[in-house]
Image: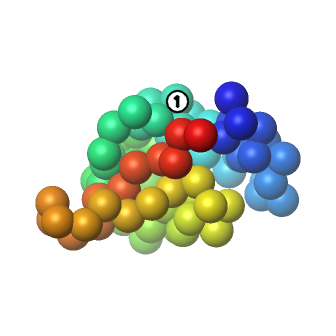
Amino acid sequence: MRTRNIIMNSSNSLKVKNNMDKLYIALYDTIFSPKDVIEILGVSPNTATKYINKFKELGLLEQIKGIGQSKYKFNNE
């Protein structure tokens, strides 16, 4: 719940907040890549990277090393 509050209280637009919340709900307990973001939101690779960067800026995401490039998971605290 803490993560969703951080997303909703961020300075992003409502549309971006809603998309971030949608991504969190879909991916909160998985290791994922930008490709998953593309599939869930139907966005371009560039936009998927922007969403990942927004999560990182909020301190909600960590990169997973050792299982390929561009793998991430949420910091579910």
Q: Residue at x 80, y 54 (%)?
A: 10
Q: Quadrant of residue 18?
A: top right
The amino acid marked with disc number 1 is Ile
Q: Is residue 28 found left or right of 67 in the rendered image?
A: right
Q: Secondary structure at mark 1?
A: helix
Q: Residue at x 44, y 53 (%)?
A: 43
Residue 52 horizontal/vertical position (percent): 49, 61
Quarter of the figure with the N terminus: top right
Eyeballing the image, is 73 above or below 1? below
Q: Quadrant of residue 30?
A: top left
Q: Is residue 70 found left or right of 74 in the rendered image?
A: left
Q: Residue at x 77, y 38 (%)?
A: 5
Residue 72 horizontal/vertical position (percent): 36, 56
Q: Which residue lies most toward the left here? A: 67
Q: Residue at x 40, y 33 (%)?
A: 29
Residue 39 horizontal/vertical position (percent): 33, 43
Say which residue label 1 marks: 25
Eyeballing the image, is 64 above or below 14? below
In this rendered view, identify the residue nearer to me: 24 or 14.
Answer: 24
In this rendered view, identify the residue nearer to me: 18 or 63.
Answer: 63
Viewer can see residue 29: yes
In this rendered view, identify the residue nearer to me: 62 or 36.
Answer: 62
Quarter of the figure with the C terminus: top right
Residue 74 horizontal/vertical position (percent): 48, 47
Label 1 Cα neighbours within 10 Å, binned few <14 / some 14-19 / many ≥20 = few
Viewer can see residue 54: no
Q: Is residue 58 found left or right of 41 in the rendered image?
A: right
Q: Which residue lies most toward the front here? A: 77
The number of numbered discs placed on residues in the rendered structure image is 1
